[in-house]
Amino acid sequence: MDIIVCVKQIPDPEIPPSKFKLDIESKKVVPPEGIPPVMNPYDEQAVELALRLKDKYGGKITVLTLGSEATSSIAKHALAMGADEGIVITNKAFEDSDSFSKAYILSQAIKKVGDYDLVLCGRQAADWDEGLVGSIIAENLGLPLVTLAEAVDVANGKLKVKRVILDGYQVFTVPIPAVVTVSNEVGRPRLPSGWGIISASQKQIPVWSVDDIEADSSKTGASAARRKLVKLFIPERERKCEIIERETTAEASIELVDTLIKAGAI
Amino acid sequence: MDFELTEEQRMFHDMARKFAEQEILPTLKENERQEKFDPGIIKKMASQGLLAPHMPKEYGGLGLDYITSAIIWEQLCGASLSVTQAAVSGPIQPATNLLDAGTEEQKKKYLPPVCKGESIMSGAVVEPTAGSDSSMIETVARRSGNRWIINGTKIFITNGEIADVVLFIAQTDKSKGLKGLASFIVERDTPGFSSTPLKGKISWRGGSEGTLRFTDMELPLENQVGEIGGALRDALRGIDTARLFLAAGAVGLAQSCLEASIKYAKERVQFGKPIGGHQLIQEIIAKMATKVDAARWLTYRAADLKSRGIRHIKEMSYAKYFSTEAALWIASQAVKIHGSFGTIDDYPVGHHYQDAITATILGGTAQMHQLTIGQQLLEMAAFR
């Protein structure tokens, strides 16, 4: 089974809150000094799911990532886990793309990769949490889509996808090829092995540009963005503790409900 | 000169740290309370490629340089120096010794299983009367026809109770002193071999030590490793790698204490503000951080010299002596910063403090390394 996994580089979500800074003027996150970015944890779980399928059925795993050449470290992380090939797609024209543009670029890259049975994406990226790219890729490629998968298997030449819902799970049977977004219920991704790290660090990661994937630049970048970022800020959190004391518990409860309604909490 | 980690080193750093968090930390507290070492961690490290990073690929290692190996050991020991030492000591000390002194047949037979976690190897030098002074070794090897007959006792032997195979030193002719010492390799099921675990430790409680007894133990001649008279020199090659491991491990231990202390000093509020805002705490944190950094670079420098095959006796002693002594001081200060909480095992600093005591003794005491440095600088020995 040949699988393409789309992975994203994000600021390390484990950094202490004091290290998280914004540039209000440019409406951008300031990369924390001395803390390298990491692979989006949901994408890492997508790589893990791909590796489980490869362990069972064989095939090839290709990892696509969008960003600068520095993003190759994320592709190498996937290679060290066991993926076969990593490709970085980068171009000035891609900067400040929104989810629609990123999905367009990735769709073009997927077309260039060619043969595949399955495209996996993380359910969302842990930086902006939009969760759109996987769905839009499916739309762009005209493929069936299942979101929030916790397991994928193959049965009778079709994909059998277990999808997480609030009170249980659903099972979908989907023709191949398809796009599946992967949820954290997949479980802990495997660590890169020592031999995987040595092999990955010696590999050159191909870098594709706008021309390589025959992308229309007018559909990428800030000018093509459908999502307009109006303001970026860190919300202020205020903690207050108010003790409601009344003669009876019933009176206190009514007062508590009134207070919460006034505060907009319920 | 470049002080940045390479991409490969960064990947090993991150992987080893996560491995330690996932595989060592969850069971550490309970195992230490029971003075228990779980040998299952050896197989886990082997399957991850962390058991023998410095050993050549042909014998089951990763063939990495010593700086990268030190980075891995540092990260593993950030969880527990004693557990990591018990897990990796086979590939580090006796295996390195065998790699240098063994025949090709011995190396092919014993090294791959040890580096792959399929067999546990111990190195046995220390005896009740012979610690830093190997000339006091009393384990006797007597030649009888085509056999060696071994009698003696080895103590404080890492994994002595669970080792499948032991590389040890014995005296073949007491009149020759150090020149009478020879190395031998023995498998556990050999008649005359017995072992008992070491219990009641106040330090290194996550590790694994035992006492070995050899009673009229017969070995074929081919179990001799290296030449008679070369045993101490051969063993010191393995011990040199063990010293690098201990220096790197001490850096990892100290870094963990520093991180825990900074976190606690930001959270713990006394006299109306986090204790990190008090000048005396800041002074301690500043000293801790400076010592960690100094220890790390002394260790990496020694590792670099070792990787490049450059003589490094003095530099390895700098690294082992300074790093372990610094780690002991840093761990003691970390306990103090945590106050009474530092004395219970819900926080990492207490067990690091215990391990740091033993780290100053293993692989040559601080005093022996001071004497080694003095000898190198003054060109005269103070201990022989």
Image (spheres, rainbow, N blue to C red):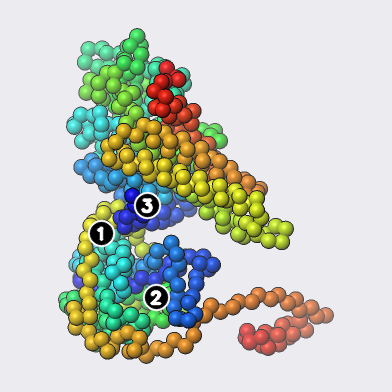
* Numbered tag placed on residue A125 in the rendering: 2
| Amino acid type, residue under disc 3 in the picture | Phe
Q: Which subunit holds the residue at mark 1?
A: A
* Numbered tag placed on residue B348 in the rendering: none
Residue at 49% in and 75% down: A22
Q: Is residue B263 visible?
A: yes
Q: Residues within 10 Å of mark 1 (few under 14, many from 20)?
A: many
Vertical relation: B121 (above or below) A256: above
Reading the image, the residue beneath label 1 is A200
User: What secondary structure is marked by label 3?
Assistant: loop
**Horizontal and vertical percent for residue B179?**
31, 16
| Amino acid type, residue under disc 1 in the picture | Ala
Residue at 41% in and 33% down: B317
**Horizontal and vertical percent for residue B54?**
30, 43
| Amino acid type, residue under disc 2 in the picture | Ala
Q: Which subunit holds the residue at mark 2?
A: A
- Mark-to-mark CA distance, 1 and 2: 24 Å
User: What secondary structure is marked by label 1?
Assistant: helix
> Do discs 1 and 2 belong to a common subunit?
yes
Reading the image, the residue beneath label 3 is B3
Q: Toward which corner of the image does residue A243 lie, by quadrant?
A: bottom right
